Image: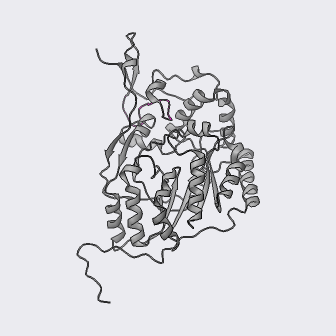
Amino acid sequence: MSPASSHALKHPPVTAPSEPAGAPSDFPELGVAIDRARRRGRGAQSNASGRYEAEARVAFDDGWQSLEELPPFKTTVAVDTSRKVITRNDSPDIGFDRSINPYRGCEHGCVYCFARPTHAYLGLSPGLDFESKLFVKPEAPALLEKELAAPGYEPRMIAIGTNTDPYQPIERERKIMRGILEVLERASHPVGIVTKSALVVRDIDILQRMAKRNLAKVAISVTSLDPKLARTMEPRASTPSKRLEALKQLSDAGIPTTVMVAPVIPALNDAEIERILDAAAHAGVKEASYVLLRLPLEVRDLFREWLMANYPDRYRHVFTLIRDMRGGRDYDAKWGERMKGTGPMAWTIGRRFEIACDRLGLNKRRSKLTTDHFARPKRNGDQLSLF
């Protein structure tokens, strides 16, 4: 007999109720939820198939307790063989048009991560697969150097960490992000980094040299100062205290730093906005930003499951407020509104953020990176200049 029986369904079995509800029975999981022991240290509660799959296989206990024999989820790493590393976008409400993601998937396991649906493109689940089946781009530094050397390349700031975290745990061993920074430093190319990891301080030597020439800045997301809430939401990310210490070390080294209060989740961490900004300002941070919780595609159901499992008493209230800020929906992807929301509650959060920043002297000046120093890398076969 196989270790566990399964059923093949035509569609992923988790469906969201049309209105906020207050009991776990409102989730027709049909075996999608994974036993706690098997997902220890992970953020998602389930591993439903991606939206592009023709069938969704779900394990169920056939009476022989065979599910107990299934092994826990372990992190696996595969090689991403992409031929290019710079990704372009034309989104009108973000401040960059190109980015790099050294990794696909993220072991931090943040339950709210808006990048989770991208794992569906790989035929994998945006749930537990996203945080346990990772893909690395070992050739990223070499590919980047090749793209920067292209005759038609025009330099503009490259954003790193806008999808998955470049300093997630496997970066300690792989050091792909450091290799990318070495290429960017040689080319004098500007870079903006977003992370939740204190591992970024490992690269202070490179970042400090680049910052002296207005070529680098770093933003660290601090979602909560409550270690328990942070660990529940972001199980393998750095603790809040380590993130604040990283901000201090970066600031002391003269590297422009930003604290990101992201995401702001109503009735869960929105009361901490002022405290987070105050702690970051004391760490030497000069700039701040915030982003409202986003629940695109599969993230909505994953967040629902997580909320019911960890904060069932707040479930109804949280989703009522979310819908108040999203035009009555769980999510609205409209340009210009998806980051901040609309309505009285969204306005209140924005005003609180602005008042706190004014009080602390944040955002008085915005750091600007330059492309003036850009030196196109030499390609194999290029003739050296005589002068």
**Where, by quadrant of the figure, is residue 259 drawn?**
bottom right
Position of the N terminus, as image quadrant, is: top left
Q: How many marks?
A: 0
- Which residue occupies 38% across, 38% down? 75
- Which residue occupies 47% across, 30% down? 40
The question of residue 52 being in magenta is answered with yes
- Residue 125: x and y in percent read 41, 35
Residue at far top of view:
63
Position of the C terminus, as image quadrant, is: bottom left
Instruction: Reply above or below: 153 against 326.
Output: below
* Magenta part of the chain: 43-55
- Residue 24: x and y in percent read 58, 22
Q: Is residue 94 left or right of residue 59?
A: right
Q: Is residue 34 visible?
A: no
Q: Is residue 141 left or right of residue 256?
A: left
| Viewer-nearest residue: 183 or 368 | 183
- Which residue occupies 56% across, 44% down? 239
- Residue 183: x and y in percent read 38, 66
Q: Is residue 258 left or right of residue 349?
A: left
The question of residue 51 being in magenta is answered with yes
| Overall secondary structure of the magenta section | loop
- Residue 301: x and y in percent read 53, 33
Q: Is residue 265 visible?
A: yes
